[in-house]
Amino acid sequence: MLSQGSVSTQTGDVEQDASPTGANVNAAVLLLGAGMTAVTHPLLYVKLLIQVGHEPLPPTVGTTMFGRRVLYLPGFFSYARHIVKVDGKRGLFRGLSPRIASIAISTVIRTKAKKTELVSKDDEQNPLRKVMKETSHEMFIQCLSRIATHPFHVMSVRCMAQFVGREVKYSGLLCSISSIFQEEGVAGFYVGLMPHVLGEVVFLWCCNLLAHFINTYAVDDSLSQASALRSYTKFVMGFAVSILTYPFMLVADVMAVNNCGLAAGLPPHSPIFTSWLHCWKDLSRRGLLFRGSSFLSRRVPATAIHH
């Protein structure tokens, strides 16, 4: 029989072991996030340059399977090869350090966020109410994370956009912080925040509510694969909703560069926008609200040759 003292000693040992284990898990999550960020950075770098309208390579004339003449813009691999030709392989990782800092801060915030008891007995009887509570909690954490990390997003976007005009204004974290603060003040770190937050909030609510309604009313419990179908619903909805909310992300990135002293955000390359709504209206008028959403097949109507 174990004495009370020995039980207390073992409990203390378990608590001491649990703490390092939790720390190790958090460190592993941070390392994994940093690694994935580094691996996918070239993809996002090319996407950002396309978003700001930089097309350094000429389009090629081709035809579709129906015989229609179109202009094919360079895809990801052609664009990436061009970056390597200009800046070398290390050039593909321009603006990576602010993104890693952003991922680290976001991970810490989500880890430290207190997980309150969101589900009550009433919620068990009302699944929709449960979904709305969980989504509200998730939205709060997402908004908090976005506010904390947006300055690093702005720095990363501007570092990458320097490729357009070959500037060196934002060459590192400290240099970027100093430049933004001296020229624009604290507000400069939050340029483009509103469309980014709105896009993420709309994405969360649409994705969670659509998945709930589909799983509740469209998936029949009598199906043998009902549980498997429900597990994939949110993923599919996330993909579909991300397409619809893409313009918010595009406007946020364009505003982060606009009128900051870089060629990518100044005429003649880009108009100067007075607000993110002005930017949205201009891109919408020119049919560019989904610019950069595709990497592999980027086509422009052949009539654009004459403009």
Image: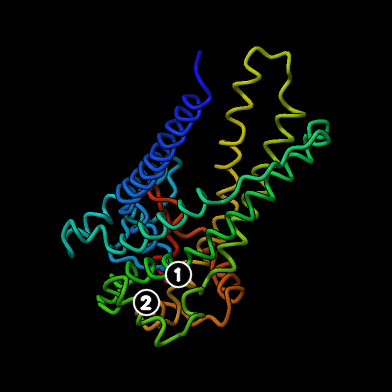
Disc 1 to disc 2, C-alpha distance: 9 Å
Circles 1 and 2: CB distance less than 8 Å?
A: yes
First in sequence: mark 1 vs mark 2: 1
Residue 188: image location, x then y, percent: 47, 79
* Figure quadrant of the C terminus: bottom left
* Label 2 environment density (alpha carbons within 10 Å; few <14, some 14–19, many ≥20): some
At 69% from the left edge and 14% from the top edge, which residue is drawn? Answer: 223
Q: Position of residue 261 (x, y in %)?
A: 37, 83
Q: Residue at x 66, y 49 (%)?
A: 137
Disc 2 marks a residue whose amino acid type is Ile
> Callout 1, which amino acid?
Pro
In this view, the residue farthest toward the bottom is 183
Image location (x, y in percent) of residue 94? 27, 63
Say left or right for 66 vs 136: left
**Residue at 29% in and 63% down:** 58
Q: Residue 151 carries which label?
A: 1
The residue lying at 45 percent from left, 63 percent from top is 303
Q: Would you say residue 66 is visible in this rendering?
A: yes
Q: Quadrant of residue 239?
A: top right
Q: Name the residue under label 2.
A: 177
Q: Nearer the viewer, residue 94 or 87?
A: 94
* Element class at badge 1: helix
Residue 78 pos. (x, y %): 26, 53
Task: Categorize mark 1 by other alpha carbons within 10 Å: few (<14), some (14-19), many (20+).
Answer: many
Task: Say whether residue 25 is left or right of residue 213.
Answer: left
